[in-house]
Image (cartoon, rainbow, N blue to C red):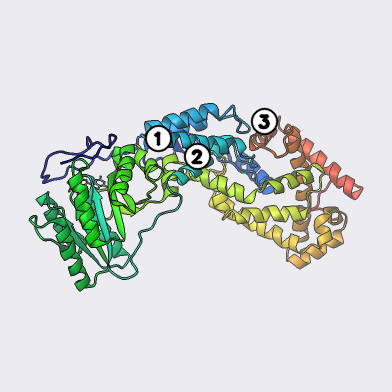
Protein backbone atom coordinates (compact mmCIF):
# COMPACT_ATOMS: atom_id res chain seq x y z
CA UNK A 1 0.00 0.00 0.00
CA UNK A 2 1.70 3.15 -1.18
CA UNK A 3 1.25 6.05 1.15
CA UNK A 4 0.89 9.51 -0.25
CA UNK A 5 3.58 11.80 0.93
CA UNK A 6 1.86 14.55 2.73
CA UNK A 7 3.83 15.14 5.81
CA UNK A 8 1.45 17.30 7.75
CA UNK A 9 -1.36 14.78 7.54
CA UNK A 10 -1.23 12.49 10.47
CA UNK A 11 -3.76 10.31 12.13
CA UNK A 12 -2.72 10.77 15.68
CA UNK A 13 -6.17 11.96 16.56
CA UNK A 14 -7.92 8.80 15.51
CA UNK A 15 -8.55 5.58 17.24
CA UNK A 16 -6.63 2.74 15.67
CA UNK A 17 -8.77 -0.11 16.92
CA UNK A 18 -10.50 -1.70 13.98
CA UNK A 19 -13.30 -2.64 13.73
CA UNK A 20 -14.62 -0.10 16.17
CA UNK A 21 -17.81 -1.44 17.64
CA UNK A 22 -18.60 1.50 19.76
CA UNK A 23 -17.57 5.04 19.25
CA UNK A 24 -16.35 6.91 22.18
CA UNK A 25 -18.01 10.25 22.13
CA UNK A 26 -15.85 13.26 22.01
CA UNK A 27 -15.85 14.88 25.36
CA UNK A 28 -17.62 18.12 25.36
CA UNK A 29 -15.61 20.82 26.90
CA UNK A 30 -17.61 23.90 27.44
CA UNK A 31 -15.71 27.07 26.95
CA UNK A 32 -14.42 28.15 30.25
CA UNK A 33 -13.47 31.54 29.00
CA UNK A 34 -13.78 33.97 31.83
CA UNK A 35 -14.37 36.67 29.31
CA UNK A 36 -17.88 37.67 28.89
CA UNK A 37 -19.73 40.76 28.03
CA UNK A 38 -22.13 42.85 29.90
CA UNK A 39 -23.34 46.35 29.81
CA UNK A 40 -22.44 48.54 32.65
CA UNK A 41 -25.40 49.92 34.43
CA UNK A 42 -25.30 53.14 36.29
CA UNK A 43 -27.73 55.27 38.15
CA UNK A 44 -30.75 56.34 36.27
CA UNK A 45 -29.86 60.02 36.37
CA UNK A 46 -26.71 59.39 34.41
CA UNK A 47 -28.76 57.18 32.15
CA UNK A 48 -31.11 60.07 31.57
CA UNK A 49 -28.18 62.38 31.06
CA UNK A 50 -26.79 60.03 28.46
CA UNK A 51 -30.14 59.69 26.82
CA UNK A 52 -30.20 63.43 26.57
CA UNK A 53 -26.93 63.25 24.72
CA UNK A 54 -28.15 60.50 22.50
CA UNK A 55 -31.26 62.46 21.87
CA UNK A 56 -29.24 65.38 20.75
CA UNK A 57 -26.18 63.87 19.21
CA UNK A 58 -26.79 60.18 18.82
CA UNK A 59 -23.58 59.43 20.53
CA UNK A 60 -23.64 55.83 21.40
CA UNK A 61 -21.08 53.49 22.70
CA UNK A 62 -20.83 50.02 24.01
CA UNK A 63 -18.51 49.07 26.78
CA UNK A 64 -17.32 45.60 27.31
CA UNK A 65 -16.63 44.21 30.69
CA UNK A 66 -14.94 41.06 31.71
CA UNK A 67 -17.82 39.86 33.80
CA UNK A 68 -21.28 39.36 32.49
CA UNK A 69 -23.71 37.28 30.64
CA UNK A 70 -22.82 36.77 27.01
CA UNK A 71 -20.23 34.04 26.98
CA UNK A 72 -18.01 33.06 24.10
CA UNK A 73 -19.46 29.72 23.15
CA UNK A 74 -16.53 28.02 21.51
CA UNK A 75 -12.85 28.43 20.82
CA UNK A 76 -12.52 29.90 24.29
CA UNK A 77 -8.76 30.18 24.16
CA UNK A 78 -8.80 31.98 20.85
CA UNK A 79 -11.49 34.31 22.09
CA UNK A 80 -9.55 35.29 25.18
CA UNK A 81 -6.31 35.59 23.19
CA UNK A 82 -7.97 38.09 20.89
CA UNK A 83 -9.50 39.91 23.81
CA UNK A 84 -6.09 40.88 25.09
CA UNK A 85 -5.58 42.65 21.75
CA UNK A 86 -8.62 44.87 22.26
CA UNK A 87 -7.60 45.58 25.82
CA UNK A 88 -4.30 47.05 24.64
CA UNK A 89 -6.24 49.77 22.87
CA UNK A 90 -8.12 50.99 25.90
CA UNK A 91 -7.70 54.70 26.30
CA UNK A 92 -6.52 55.26 22.72
CA UNK A 93 -8.30 57.79 20.55
CA UNK A 94 -7.52 56.48 17.08
CA UNK A 95 -5.89 53.47 15.52
CA UNK A 96 -2.34 54.25 14.43
CA UNK A 97 0.56 52.34 12.95
CA UNK A 98 2.23 52.50 16.35
CA UNK A 99 -0.58 51.57 18.70
CA UNK A 100 -1.69 48.54 16.70
CA UNK A 101 1.71 46.83 16.89
CA UNK A 102 1.04 45.20 20.26
CA UNK A 103 -2.57 44.21 19.54
CA UNK A 104 -1.49 42.70 16.22
CA UNK A 105 1.13 40.66 18.03
CA UNK A 106 -1.61 39.32 20.33
CA UNK A 107 -3.83 38.49 17.36
CA UNK A 108 -0.98 36.66 15.65
CA UNK A 109 -0.20 34.70 18.82
CA UNK A 110 -3.86 33.84 19.42
CA UNK A 111 -4.30 32.51 15.89
CA UNK A 112 -1.12 30.45 16.00
CA UNK A 113 -2.15 29.00 19.34
CA UNK A 114 -5.50 28.12 17.77
CA UNK A 115 -3.54 26.05 15.27
CA UNK A 116 -4.17 28.25 12.26
CA UNK A 117 -1.47 27.70 9.66
CA UNK A 118 1.37 30.21 9.60
CA UNK A 119 0.92 31.54 6.05
CA UNK A 120 -2.76 32.08 6.79
CA UNK A 121 -1.91 33.93 10.00
CA UNK A 122 0.61 36.12 8.17
CA UNK A 123 -1.85 37.11 5.47
CA UNK A 124 -4.56 37.70 8.02
CA UNK A 125 -2.45 39.93 10.25
CA UNK A 126 -1.29 41.95 7.26
CA UNK A 127 -4.83 42.46 6.00
CA UNK A 128 -6.07 43.55 9.43
CA UNK A 129 -3.11 45.90 10.00
CA UNK A 130 -3.59 47.61 6.65
CA UNK A 131 -7.26 48.17 7.26
CA UNK A 132 -6.77 49.28 10.85
CA UNK A 133 -4.31 52.02 9.93
CA UNK A 134 -6.37 53.24 7.01
CA UNK A 135 -9.68 53.27 8.81
CA UNK A 136 -11.23 56.66 9.47
CA UNK A 137 -12.76 57.66 12.76
CA UNK A 138 -16.39 56.85 13.04
CA UNK A 139 -18.17 59.07 15.45
CA UNK A 140 -19.01 57.22 18.61
CA UNK A 141 -16.83 54.19 17.87
CA UNK A 142 -13.72 53.54 19.92
CA UNK A 143 -10.50 52.15 18.45
CA UNK A 144 -10.84 48.80 20.24
CA UNK A 145 -14.37 48.43 18.88
CA UNK A 146 -13.14 49.33 15.43
CA UNK A 147 -10.45 46.70 15.60
CA UNK A 148 -13.00 44.09 16.70
CA UNK A 149 -15.04 44.96 13.63
CA UNK A 150 -12.07 44.79 11.27
CA UNK A 151 -10.95 41.44 12.70
CA UNK A 152 -14.49 40.16 12.40
CA UNK A 153 -14.76 41.23 8.74
CA UNK A 154 -11.43 39.62 7.94
CA UNK A 155 -12.36 36.42 9.78
CA UNK A 156 -15.54 36.20 7.75
CA UNK A 157 -13.53 36.71 4.56
CA UNK A 158 -11.01 34.12 5.67
CA UNK A 159 -13.74 31.56 6.18
CA UNK A 160 -15.19 32.13 2.73
CA UNK A 161 -17.48 35.12 3.23
CA UNK A 162 -20.87 33.80 2.28
CA UNK A 163 -22.47 30.56 3.40
CA UNK A 164 -21.74 27.92 0.77
CA UNK A 165 -24.95 26.06 0.04
CA UNK A 166 -25.18 22.48 -1.15
CA UNK A 167 -25.67 22.18 -4.89
CA UNK A 168 -28.47 20.03 -6.23
CA UNK A 169 -28.53 18.32 -9.61
CA UNK A 170 -30.95 19.63 -12.23
CA UNK A 171 -32.46 16.18 -12.59
CA UNK A 172 -32.78 13.85 -9.62
CA UNK A 173 -31.15 12.16 -7.95
CA UNK A 174 -28.54 14.52 -6.59
CA UNK A 175 -25.63 12.39 -5.48
CA UNK A 176 -23.48 13.33 -2.50
CA UNK A 177 -20.32 11.34 -1.95
CA UNK A 178 -18.72 11.48 1.49
CA UNK A 179 -15.05 10.78 2.05
CA UNK A 180 -12.63 11.12 4.93
CA UNK A 181 -10.23 9.48 7.31
CA UNK A 182 -11.30 6.93 9.87
CA UNK A 183 -13.30 8.07 12.83
CA UNK A 184 -13.93 11.61 11.66
CA UNK A 185 -17.67 11.06 11.70
CA UNK A 186 -18.56 10.12 8.09
CA UNK A 187 -21.15 7.48 8.96
CA UNK A 188 -22.79 9.75 11.51
CA UNK A 189 -22.70 12.64 9.04
CA UNK A 190 -24.34 10.50 6.32
CA UNK A 191 -27.41 10.00 8.49
CA UNK A 192 -27.33 13.57 9.80
CA UNK A 193 -27.21 14.84 6.23
CA UNK A 194 -30.16 12.67 5.23
CA UNK A 195 -32.17 14.13 8.09
CA UNK A 196 -31.03 17.65 7.21
CA UNK A 197 -32.19 17.16 3.60
CA UNK A 198 -35.41 15.52 4.67
CA UNK A 199 -36.21 18.62 6.69
CA UNK A 200 -35.85 20.57 3.43
CA UNK A 201 -38.52 18.37 1.93
CA UNK A 202 -36.21 16.11 -0.07
CA UNK A 203 -36.52 12.34 -0.16
CA UNK A 204 -33.24 10.59 0.58
CA UNK A 205 -31.47 7.29 0.36
CA UNK A 206 -28.22 6.24 2.00
CA UNK A 207 -25.68 3.86 0.48
CA UNK A 208 -23.44 1.93 2.87
CA UNK A 209 -20.08 1.82 1.14
CA UNK A 210 -17.73 1.23 4.07
CA UNK A 211 -16.89 -2.41 3.38
CA UNK A 212 -13.81 -2.48 5.59
CA UNK A 213 -15.55 -1.92 8.87
CA UNK A 214 -18.56 -4.26 9.06
CA UNK A 215 -19.85 -2.37 12.06
CA UNK A 216 -20.10 0.74 9.87
CA UNK A 217 -22.82 -0.89 7.73
CA UNK A 218 -24.82 -1.88 10.82
CA UNK A 219 -24.27 1.54 12.26
CA UNK A 220 -25.63 3.20 9.11
CA UNK A 221 -28.65 0.90 9.03
CA UNK A 222 -29.46 1.78 12.65
CA UNK A 223 -28.97 5.49 12.05
CA UNK A 224 -31.05 5.23 8.83
CA UNK A 225 -33.91 3.80 10.87
CA UNK A 226 -33.48 6.56 13.40
CA UNK A 227 -33.92 9.26 10.79
CA UNK A 228 -36.38 7.18 8.79
CA UNK A 229 -34.37 7.04 5.57
CA UNK A 230 -33.79 3.84 3.53
CA UNK A 231 -30.25 2.45 3.49
CA UNK A 232 -28.90 0.47 0.56
CA UNK A 233 -26.48 -2.26 1.68
CA UNK A 234 -24.67 -5.01 -0.25
CA UNK A 235 -22.52 -6.52 2.47
CA UNK A 236 -18.76 -6.38 2.70
CA UNK A 237 -17.80 -8.69 -0.17
CA UNK A 238 -18.76 -6.34 -2.96
CA UNK A 239 -16.42 -3.64 -4.18
CA UNK A 240 -17.44 -0.09 -3.22
CA UNK A 241 -17.74 0.98 -6.87
CA UNK A 242 -20.19 -1.86 -7.53
CA UNK A 243 -22.18 -1.00 -4.39
CA UNK A 244 -22.30 2.58 -5.67
CA UNK A 245 -23.65 1.44 -9.06
CA UNK A 246 -26.32 -0.80 -7.52
CA UNK A 247 -27.28 1.78 -4.95
CA UNK A 248 -27.67 4.51 -7.56
CA UNK A 249 -29.85 2.22 -9.68
CA UNK A 250 -32.06 1.54 -6.67
CA UNK A 251 -32.30 5.26 -5.90
CA UNK A 252 -33.40 6.00 -9.46
CA UNK A 253 -36.00 3.25 -9.24
CA UNK A 254 -37.29 4.71 -6.00
CA UNK A 255 -37.25 8.19 -7.46
CA UNK A 256 -35.43 9.69 -4.49
CA UNK A 257 -34.22 13.26 -4.61
CA UNK A 258 -30.84 12.82 -2.95
CA UNK A 259 -28.48 9.87 -2.50
CA UNK A 260 -25.75 10.05 0.13
CA UNK A 261 -22.95 7.52 -0.03
CA UNK A 262 -20.82 6.68 2.98
CA UNK A 263 -17.34 5.38 2.20
CA UNK A 264 -14.57 3.73 4.15
CA UNK A 265 -12.11 5.75 6.11
CA UNK A 266 -8.44 4.92 6.53
CA UNK A 267 -5.91 5.59 9.19
CA UNK A 268 -3.89 7.42 6.62
CA UNK A 269 -4.29 8.57 3.09
CA UNK A 270 -3.16 5.79 0.82
CA UNK A 271 -3.13 5.14 -2.89
CA UNK A 272 -5.58 2.21 -2.73
CA UNK A 273 -8.09 4.31 -0.85
CA UNK A 274 -7.78 7.16 -3.33
CA UNK A 275 -8.10 4.83 -6.32
CA UNK A 276 -11.16 3.22 -4.81
CA UNK A 277 -12.72 6.60 -4.22
CA UNK A 278 -11.94 7.65 -7.76
CA UNK A 279 -13.76 4.54 -9.02
CA UNK A 280 -16.77 5.29 -6.86
CA UNK A 281 -16.77 8.89 -8.02
CA UNK A 282 -16.64 7.84 -11.67
CA UNK A 283 -19.66 5.56 -11.24
CA UNK A 284 -21.73 8.01 -9.22
CA UNK A 285 -20.83 11.23 -11.05
CA UNK A 286 -21.76 13.08 -7.84
CA UNK A 287 -22.93 16.66 -7.61
CA UNK A 288 -21.14 17.04 -4.32
CA UNK A 289 -18.01 15.31 -3.07
CA UNK A 290 -17.62 16.34 0.52
CA UNK A 291 -14.64 15.58 2.66
CA UNK A 292 -15.55 15.02 6.27
CA UNK A 293 -12.85 16.42 8.55
CA UNK A 294 -12.48 16.53 12.29
CA UNK A 295 -12.28 20.07 13.72
CA UNK A 296 -9.91 18.85 16.41
CA UNK A 297 -7.20 18.22 13.84
CA UNK A 298 -6.71 21.94 13.38
CA UNK A 299 -4.69 23.01 10.39
CA UNK A 300 -4.18 19.36 9.43
CA UNK A 301 -7.82 19.34 8.39
CA UNK A 302 -7.02 22.09 5.90
CA UNK A 303 -4.04 20.15 4.54
CA UNK A 304 -6.22 17.08 4.20
CA UNK A 305 -8.86 18.98 2.24
CA UNK A 306 -6.11 20.21 -0.10
CA UNK A 307 -4.78 16.68 -0.65
CA UNK A 308 -8.18 15.14 -1.30
CA UNK A 309 -9.03 17.95 -3.65
CA UNK A 310 -5.86 17.46 -5.65
CA UNK A 311 -6.30 13.70 -5.70
CA UNK A 312 -9.99 13.17 -6.38
CA UNK A 313 -11.50 16.62 -6.75
CA UNK A 314 -13.91 17.64 -4.03
CA UNK A 315 -16.58 20.31 -3.81
CA UNK A 316 -16.27 21.17 -0.14
CA UNK A 317 -15.81 19.98 3.40
CA UNK A 318 -17.93 19.06 6.38
CA UNK A 319 -16.31 19.97 9.67
CA UNK A 320 -17.32 17.68 12.53
CA UNK A 321 -16.92 17.84 16.29
CA UNK A 322 -17.04 21.60 16.48
CA UNK A 323 -18.74 21.14 19.81
CA UNK A 324 -15.60 19.56 21.16
CA UNK A 325 -12.40 21.02 22.40
CA UNK A 326 -11.21 22.28 19.03
CA UNK A 327 -9.11 25.40 18.94
CA UNK A 328 -10.45 26.85 15.73
CA UNK A 329 -7.54 26.20 13.37
CA UNK A 330 -9.56 23.97 11.06
CA UNK A 331 -12.52 26.31 10.73
CA UNK A 332 -10.18 29.20 10.03
CA UNK A 333 -7.76 27.47 7.67
CA UNK A 334 -9.76 25.14 5.41
CA UNK A 335 -11.03 27.70 2.88
CA UNK A 336 -7.86 29.78 2.79
CA UNK A 337 -5.51 26.80 2.44
CA UNK A 338 -7.52 24.56 0.12
CA UNK A 339 -9.76 27.01 -1.70
CA UNK A 340 -12.68 24.71 -0.89
CA UNK A 341 -15.50 25.90 1.33
CA UNK A 342 -16.73 24.32 4.53
CA UNK A 343 -20.34 23.63 3.65
CA UNK A 344 -21.68 22.07 6.81
CA UNK A 345 -20.61 21.64 10.41
CA UNK A 346 -21.35 18.95 12.96
CA UNK A 347 -21.83 20.26 16.44
CA UNK A 348 -22.81 17.23 18.43
CA UNK A 349 -23.64 13.55 18.28
CA UNK A 350 -27.38 13.91 17.85
CA UNK A 351 -28.83 13.49 14.38
CA UNK A 352 -30.03 17.09 14.44
CA UNK A 353 -26.54 18.43 15.07
CA UNK A 354 -25.63 19.33 11.51
CA UNK A 355 -25.97 22.83 10.20
CA UNK A 356 -24.71 25.08 7.40
CA UNK A 357 -21.41 26.80 8.01
CA UNK A 358 -22.05 30.50 8.37
CA UNK A 359 -18.73 32.37 8.32
CA UNK A 360 -20.25 35.47 9.89
CA UNK A 361 -21.85 33.58 12.76
CA UNK A 362 -18.64 31.66 13.30
CA UNK A 363 -16.67 34.91 13.46
CA UNK A 364 -19.23 36.21 15.92
CA UNK A 365 -18.80 33.13 18.09
CA UNK A 366 -15.03 33.36 17.98
CA UNK A 367 -15.08 36.99 19.00
CA UNK A 368 -17.97 36.55 21.38
CA UNK A 369 -18.95 40.14 20.68
CA UNK A 370 -22.08 40.10 18.62
CA UNK A 371 -23.32 43.19 20.40
CA UNK A 372 -20.22 45.27 19.70
CA UNK A 373 -20.25 44.23 16.06
CA UNK A 374 -23.86 45.12 15.50
CA UNK A 375 -23.30 48.39 17.28
CA UNK A 376 -20.35 49.37 15.07
CA UNK A 377 -22.28 48.38 11.96
CA UNK A 378 -25.23 50.49 12.99
CA UNK A 379 -22.97 53.38 13.86
CA UNK A 380 -21.29 53.13 10.47
CA UNK A 381 -24.65 53.02 8.78
CA UNK A 382 -26.22 55.91 10.55
CA UNK A 383 -23.44 58.22 11.48
CA UNK A 384 -21.91 58.95 8.14
CA UNK A 385 -18.78 60.98 8.58
CA UNK A 386 -19.95 63.78 6.31
CA UNK A 387 -23.13 64.10 8.33
CA UNK A 388 -21.12 64.26 11.51
CA UNK A 389 -18.87 66.96 10.13
CA UNK A 390 -21.81 68.89 8.80
CA UNK A 391 -23.49 68.62 12.17
CA UNK A 392 -20.39 69.78 13.96
CA UNK A 393 -20.23 72.88 11.78
CA UNK A 394 -23.80 73.64 12.65
CA UNK A 395 -23.25 73.11 16.32
CA UNK A 396 -20.20 75.34 16.38
CA UNK A 397 -22.05 78.10 14.61
CA UNK A 398 -25.14 77.52 16.77
CA UNK A 399 -27.19 76.78 13.69
CA UNK A 400 -28.53 73.45 14.79
CA UNK A 401 -32.15 73.73 13.71
CA UNK A 402 -35.34 71.73 13.69
CA UNK A 403 -34.38 70.04 10.42
CA UNK A 404 -31.28 68.63 12.12
CA UNK A 405 -33.35 67.75 15.12
CA UNK A 406 -35.74 65.79 12.92
CA UNK A 407 -32.91 64.16 10.95
CA UNK A 408 -31.27 63.00 14.13
CA UNK A 409 -34.52 61.71 15.52
CA UNK A 410 -35.14 59.73 12.37
CA UNK A 411 -31.60 58.40 12.42
CA UNK A 412 -32.42 56.77 15.71
CA UNK A 413 -35.57 55.31 14.23
CA UNK A 414 -33.44 53.87 11.42
CA UNK A 415 -31.28 52.12 13.95
CA UNK A 416 -34.15 49.96 14.99
CA UNK A 417 -36.40 50.12 17.92
CA UNK A 418 -35.35 52.46 20.62
CA UNK A 419 -35.21 49.70 23.16
CA UNK A 420 -32.53 48.02 21.04
CA UNK A 421 -30.57 51.21 20.69
CA UNK A 422 -30.83 51.91 24.39
CA UNK A 423 -29.79 48.37 25.11
CA UNK A 424 -26.50 49.07 23.39
CA UNK A 425 -25.68 52.06 25.50
CA UNK A 426 -23.75 51.68 28.71
CA UNK A 427 -25.58 53.25 31.57
CA UNK A 428 -28.93 52.35 30.09
CA UNK A 429 -29.20 49.21 32.12
CA UNK A 430 -31.66 50.75 34.49
CA UNK A 431 -33.94 52.26 31.93
CA UNK A 432 -37.24 50.51 32.28
CA UNK A 433 -39.46 49.45 29.38
CA UNK A 434 -41.93 52.07 30.57
CA UNK A 435 -39.27 54.78 30.27
CA UNK A 436 -38.41 53.55 26.81
CA UNK A 437 -42.05 53.68 25.76
CA UNK A 438 -42.22 57.16 27.22
CA UNK A 439 -39.16 58.28 25.23
CA UNK A 440 -40.58 56.80 22.05
CA UNK A 441 -43.85 58.59 22.63
CA UNK A 442 -42.15 61.93 23.19
CA UNK A 443 -40.18 61.52 19.96
CA UNK A 444 -43.44 61.02 18.10
CA UNK A 445 -44.87 64.13 19.71
CA UNK A 446 -41.80 66.13 18.71
CA UNK A 447 -42.00 64.88 15.16
CA UNK A 448 -45.64 65.90 14.88
CA UNK A 449 -44.82 69.41 16.04
CA UNK A 450 -41.80 69.80 13.76
CA UNK A 451 -43.85 68.58 10.81
CA UNK A 452 -46.36 71.34 11.49
CA UNK A 453 -43.65 73.99 11.18
CA UNK A 454 -43.00 75.89 7.95
CA UNK A 455 -39.58 75.32 6.33
CA UNK A 456 -38.58 78.78 7.49
CA UNK A 457 -39.57 78.07 11.07
CA UNK A 458 -37.59 74.86 11.04
CA UNK A 459 -34.50 76.70 9.88
CA UNK A 460 -34.98 79.66 12.19
CA UNK A 461 -36.24 78.51 15.57
CA UNK A 462 -35.92 82.14 16.66
CA UNK A 463 -39.13 82.87 14.74
CA UNK A 464 -40.97 80.53 17.05
CA UNK A 465 -39.26 81.85 20.12
CA UNK A 466 -40.42 85.32 19.27
CA UNK A 467 -43.97 84.58 18.22
CA UNK A 468 -46.66 83.13 20.48
CA UNK A 469 -48.97 83.23 17.45
CA UNK A 470 -46.72 80.87 15.50
CA UNK A 471 -46.45 78.51 18.47
CA UNK A 472 -50.22 78.55 18.81
CA UNK A 473 -50.68 77.69 15.13
CA UNK A 474 -48.21 74.76 15.42
CA UNK A 475 -49.99 73.53 18.51
CA UNK A 476 -53.30 73.56 16.68
CA UNK A 477 -51.95 71.92 13.53
CA UNK A 478 -50.12 69.17 15.37
CA UNK A 479 -52.84 68.56 17.92
CA UNK A 480 -50.49 69.34 20.80
CA UNK A 481 -50.66 71.98 23.50
CA UNK A 482 -49.00 75.38 23.26
CA UNK A 483 -46.98 74.43 26.29
CA UNK A 484 -45.59 71.41 24.50
CA UNK A 485 -44.58 73.57 21.53
CA UNK A 486 -42.89 76.05 23.84
CA UNK A 487 -41.04 73.26 25.57
CA UNK A 488 -39.80 71.91 22.26
CA UNK A 489 -38.47 75.30 21.20
CA UNK A 490 -36.78 75.75 24.57
CA UNK A 491 -35.28 72.31 24.26
CA UNK A 492 -33.71 73.16 20.94
CA UNK A 493 -32.02 76.22 22.36
CA UNK A 494 -30.83 74.30 25.39
CA UNK A 495 -29.51 71.67 23.09
CA UNK A 496 -27.51 74.19 21.09
CA UNK A 497 -25.84 75.44 24.24
CA UNK A 498 -25.25 72.00 25.58
CA UNK A 499 -23.73 70.75 22.39
CA UNK A 500 -21.54 73.77 22.07
CA UNK A 501 -20.28 73.20 25.60
CA UNK A 502 -19.48 69.62 24.86
CA UNK A 503 -17.75 70.47 21.61
CA UNK A 504 -15.72 73.08 23.42
CA UNK A 505 -14.29 70.46 25.71
CA UNK A 506 -13.03 68.42 22.81
CA UNK A 507 -9.59 69.11 21.57
CA UNK A 508 -9.35 69.62 17.81
CA UNK A 509 -10.07 66.84 15.35
CA UNK A 510 -12.72 67.26 12.75
CA UNK A 511 -15.00 64.59 14.08
CA UNK A 512 -15.70 64.23 17.76
CA UNK A 513 -14.40 61.09 19.34
CA UNK A 514 -16.75 59.48 21.75
CA UNK A 515 -14.29 59.18 24.55
CA UNK A 516 -13.97 62.96 24.61
CA UNK A 517 -17.67 63.30 24.71
CA UNK A 518 -17.96 60.83 27.49
CA UNK A 519 -15.33 62.67 29.46
CA UNK A 520 -17.13 65.90 28.85
CA UNK A 521 -20.39 64.44 30.02
CA UNK A 522 -18.73 62.96 33.07
CA UNK A 523 -17.00 66.20 33.98
CA UNK A 524 -20.32 67.97 33.66
CA UNK A 525 -21.85 65.42 35.95
CA UNK A 526 -19.02 65.71 38.41
CA UNK A 527 -19.16 69.49 38.60
CA UNK A 528 -20.41 70.82 41.95
CA UNK A 529 -24.19 70.74 42.05
CA UNK A 530 -25.69 73.62 40.27
CA UNK A 531 -22.60 74.96 38.56
CA UNK A 532 -22.85 73.25 35.21
CA UNK A 533 -26.58 73.39 35.13
CA UNK A 534 -26.63 76.99 36.25
CA UNK A 535 -24.09 77.86 33.60
CA UNK A 536 -26.06 76.00 30.98
CA UNK A 537 -29.27 77.66 31.99
CA UNK A 538 -27.79 81.12 31.91
CA UNK A 539 -26.18 80.47 28.54
CA UNK A 540 -29.41 79.15 27.24
CA UNK A 541 -31.15 82.28 28.40
CA UNK A 542 -28.45 84.43 26.88
CA UNK A 543 -28.90 82.69 23.55
CA UNK A 544 -32.54 83.03 23.70
CA UNK A 545 -32.28 86.62 24.75
CA UNK A 546 -29.97 87.14 21.81
CA UNK A 547 -32.55 85.81 19.46
CA UNK A 548 -35.65 87.40 20.84
CA UNK A 549 -34.17 90.54 22.20
CA UNK A 550 -35.51 89.92 25.70
CA UNK A 551 -34.87 87.22 28.24
CA UNK A 552 -37.87 85.36 29.44
CA UNK A 553 -37.36 84.23 33.00
CA UNK A 554 -40.56 82.24 32.96
CA UNK A 555 -39.49 80.00 30.10
CA UNK A 556 -41.66 78.94 27.28
CA UNK A 557 -44.33 77.38 29.33
CA UNK A 558 -45.27 80.83 30.57
CA UNK A 559 -47.89 82.94 28.95
CA UNK A 560 -46.13 85.28 26.60
N1 LIG B 1 -19.16 15.37 19.65
C1 LIG B 1 -19.31 15.00 18.39
N2 LIG B 1 -19.11 13.73 18.05
C2 LIG B 1 -19.27 13.38 16.77
C3 LIG B 1 -19.64 14.31 15.76
N3 LIG B 1 -19.71 13.66 14.59
C4 LIG B 1 -19.41 12.37 14.85
N4 LIG B 1 -19.15 12.20 16.15
C5 LIG B 1 -18.76 10.97 16.85
O1 LIG B 1 -17.53 10.53 16.33
C6 LIG B 1 -17.45 9.14 16.41
C7 LIG B 1 -17.02 8.56 15.07
O2 LIG B 1 -18.07 8.77 14.15
P1 LIG B 1 -18.32 7.81 12.90
O3 LIG B 1 -19.48 8.37 12.16
O4 LIG B 1 -18.40 6.41 13.30
O5 LIG B 1 -17.00 8.03 12.10
P2 LIG B 1 -16.57 7.44 10.70
O6 LIG B 1 -15.81 8.50 10.02
O7 LIG B 1 -17.73 6.89 9.98
O8 LIG B 1 -15.61 6.29 11.13
P3 LIG B 1 -15.01 5.13 10.17
O9 LIG B 1 -16.19 4.38 9.66
O10 LIG B 1 -14.19 4.34 11.11
O11 LIG B 1 -14.24 5.77 9.13
C8 LIG B 1 -18.81 8.67 16.88
O12 LIG B 1 -18.77 8.42 18.26
C9 LIG B 1 -19.72 9.86 16.60
O13 LIG B 1 -20.81 9.90 17.48
C10 LIG B 1 -19.83 15.69 16.17
O14 LIG B 1 -20.11 16.59 15.39
N5 LIG B 1 -19.65 15.97 17.50
The residue that appears at 40% across and 35% down in the rendered structure is 78
Q: Quadrant of residue 12?
A: top left
Q: Secondary structure at mark 2?
A: helix
Q: Residue at x 52, y 47 (%)?
A: 374
What is the x, y in percent for residue 427? 57, 40
Q: Is residue 319 visible?
A: no
* Residue linked to disc 2: 151
Quadrant containing the N terminus in the rendered view: top left
In the figure, 101 relative to 137: above or below?
A: above
Residue designated by label 1: 78
Secondary structure state at the residue bearing disc 1: helix
Closest to the observer, 118 or 27 = 118
Residue 338: x %, y % from top left: 37, 45
Q: Which residue is at 71% across, 29% downward?
A: 528
Q: Quick check: can you spot residue 10?
A: yes
**Which of these two is toward me, 13 or 488?**
13
Amino acid sequence: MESLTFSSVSTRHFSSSFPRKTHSPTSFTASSSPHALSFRSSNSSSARELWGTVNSQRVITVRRERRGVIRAEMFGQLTSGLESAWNKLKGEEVLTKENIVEPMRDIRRALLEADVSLPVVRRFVQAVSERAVGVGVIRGVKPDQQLVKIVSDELVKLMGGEVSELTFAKSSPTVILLAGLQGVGKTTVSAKLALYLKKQGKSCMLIAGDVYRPAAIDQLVILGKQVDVPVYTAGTDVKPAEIARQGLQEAKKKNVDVVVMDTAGRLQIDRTMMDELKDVKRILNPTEVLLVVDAMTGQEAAALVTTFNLEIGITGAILTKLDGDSRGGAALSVKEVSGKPIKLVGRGERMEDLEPFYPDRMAGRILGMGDVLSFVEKAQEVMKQEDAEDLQQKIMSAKFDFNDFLKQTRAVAQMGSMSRVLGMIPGMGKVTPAQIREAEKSLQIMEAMIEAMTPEEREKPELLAESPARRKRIAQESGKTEQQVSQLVAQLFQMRVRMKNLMGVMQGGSVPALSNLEEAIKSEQKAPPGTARRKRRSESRKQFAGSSGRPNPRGFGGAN
